[in-house]
Image: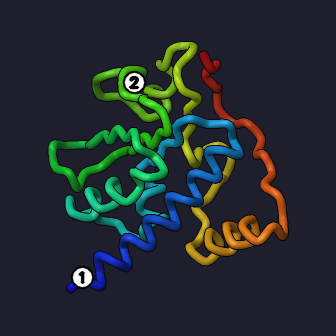
Amino acid sequence: MTDPHREFCRQQHRIIAHYLAVQAWMRGLDCIVLVRDDLEAFLELERFKSTRVEWLKEDLKPWFPYQTAYYKTSAPSSIHSLFLARVPIEKHLSDGSMTTEERIRRMADGSPRTERFTTKYDGSQIPSHAKMVSTLSVLAAGLDAPRRTRRRLKRHKSA
């Protein structure tokens, strides 16, 4: 018998994954980064259990097969940021403790194009689940066309 809570989470994660994939595509990104604040808002949680983090990563794999997670401590529930990519990304990321912005800035020219989903500087916000579903439905029905968003952070040149 399937666990109803797991199925609810899987559905929620798939909506988020599809929305992020469309956002990455519209921004011309190979990798989109969620920081903890993004994750808390998307999942409507303030605390993460390690199981929920693992479920999230598993459910995002079809859209983002390459994932690199950073943690504040060794506890899987202390997730700090999650790099989600459609291409291999790990070899382009610096080791060590640093901010997400610094990690992105340290990526060399020719690295996969990477950007945070939200930034502190542009007032971007996480859409509600209803807004994500509405946006995806309108696009899928052909009632509107995707619009490229303006570039916010330094982009890495494609190889």
Q: Secondary structure at mark 1?
A: loop
Left or right: residue 52 compared with residue 116 = left
Occupied quadrant, residue 89: top left
Q: Position of residue 123 (x, y in %)?
A: 66, 52
Occupied quadrant, residue 133: bottom right
Q: CA distance from mark 2 to mark 1?
A: 36 Å
Residue 137 or residue 97, whichever sits in front: 137
Mark 2 is surrounded, within 10 Å at the Cα level, by few (under 14), some (14 to 19) or many (20 or more) other residues, namely some
Tell me which residue sits at (59%, 59%) in the image. Answer: 19
Q: Amino acid at mark 1?
A: Asp
Residue 93: which disc?
2
Q: Amino acid at mark 2?
A: Leu
Occupied quadrant, residue 143: bottom right
* Quarter placement of the N terminus: bottom left
Q: Position of residue 12 (x, y in %)?
A: 45, 71
Q: Secondary structure at mark 2?
A: loop
Left or right: residue 155 compared with residue 143 = left
Left or right: residue 56 compared with residue 49 = right
Tell me which residue sits at (30%, 22%) in the image. Answer: 95
Quickly name the residue at label 1: 3
